[in-house]
Image (cartoon, grey):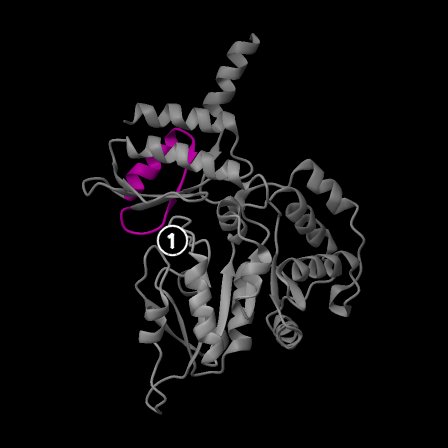
Amino acid sequence: MDSRHFIFELKIKMRIDLRSDTITQPTAEMKTAMMQAKLGDDVFHEDPSVNELEEFVADMFGKEKALFCPSGTMTNQIAIKVHTQPGDEIICDRSAHIYNYEGGGIGFNSGASVRLIEGDLGRFTLNDVIENINPDNDHYPRTAMVSIENTVNRGGGSIWNIAEIERISTFCSENNLKIHLDGARLFNALTETHETCLQHGSLFDSLSLCLSKGLGAPAGSVLCGDSYFIDKARRIRKVFGGGMRQAGILASAGIYALKHHVHRLKDDHLKAKILAKHISETYFCLKVLPVETNILIFELKPEYKTDVILRKLAENNIYALNIGKQRIRMVTHLDFTDLMLEKACEILKLMS
């Protein structure tokens, strides 16, 4: 077999996995950093790599403290538990991850209810918040906090306008409401807007920041806030079973990701836009949501079934995700190479 034939076979057989940016594998350099990590017992506050990560992220966002946790679901749910009492209510968008994809944790963990806003691709306004605050009346749950997701997963990676966040943040501060950021993909947003971590840190009482999506770490999220908040959060992490021991192996991957992988997120965004053009020209696509970052969501024409199109894509080694009636999601990431993009575009052209 000559080299040209080998390349052809490689292109045909490669698996192009676009289900999520969580499927990335640690790079060789990240694995080296993990194996060289200094370790201790984090439950005793003695893991130097975890301590370094927490201090690094807290400084990035101008917060007093940070807490390393296994997942973004845990950091979000800890924040909700700290900010609310049973019977309180949270305001968020209908598409929010904390509402749709965290196993009913708001009710299960915190005994809180949810007021859902019908926003624009997951984003809402100060007026929306004001209209959804309950009266100070025994018949209603007490409105306790507002949660914002940036970027918005179900909004196709949509980015919030920081001016609107500033308006909501000021209102919350003036009206004794807590404001939390689900920043699972915040670095994707910052790559596009060129806003700073410090800007966003100043706008929220708590921030959840994921390391295992576009940044490519194998696991972990960091929760930031003031000292009082993080001290309470650490106790709740213990109750939730999130206290880890020699967690520095994972924390060192997060440190490496923050120092080396943020700048390259722009590449993922460009690839998503290229894919979106080819998806929009396929026979089954009705429309593509605006692509701002690394998430591409498209809606199928009424005559096509989601499972049929997913199967057709999988037959050509392209894997995507069903995210609701007539909607399919693709997410570009660290392991989606230029060669994979080329092959995916070739396949999609044949489906036009």
Quadrant in the picture for the N terminus: top right
Instruction: Choose between 235 and 191: the one closer to the eye.
Output: 191
The type of residue carrying mark 1 is Arg
Residue at the image point whose x is 36% and y is 88% from the top: 136
In the image as oriented, which residue stretches furthest toward the top? 2
Place residue 243 in its image quadrant: bottom right
Place residue 247 in its image quadrant: bottom right
Highlighted range, magenta:
306-326
Image-based side of 27 in relation to 77, left or right: right
Q: Position of residue 157 (x, y in %)?
A: 42, 49
Instruction: Choose between 73 and 172: the one closer to the eye.
Output: 172
- Judge whether 224 appears above or below 227 on screen: above
Q: Check disc 1 and report the residue beneath it.
A: 154
Q: Is residue 128 visible?
A: yes
Residue at the image point whose x is 52% and y is 53% from the top: 186
Instruction: Choose between 248 and 167: the one closer to the eye.
Output: 167
Whether residue 310 appears in magenta in the rendering, the answer is yes
Residue at the image point whose x is 38% and y is 84% from the top: 141
Q: Position of residue 272 (x, y in %)?
A: 43, 37
Q: Is residue 71 visible?
A: no
Whether residue 283 appears in magenta in the rendering, the answer is no
Residue at the image point whose x is 59% and y is 71% from the top: 240
Q: Position of residue 150 (x, y in %)?
A: 46, 56
Quadrant in the picture for the C terminus: top left
Q: Secondary structure at mark 1?
A: loop
- Judge whether 13 appears above or below 190 on screen: above
Image-based side of 215 in relation to 126, left or right: right
Instruction: Choose between 195 and 323: the one closer to the eye.
Output: 195
In the image as oriented, which residue stretches furthest toward the left? 303
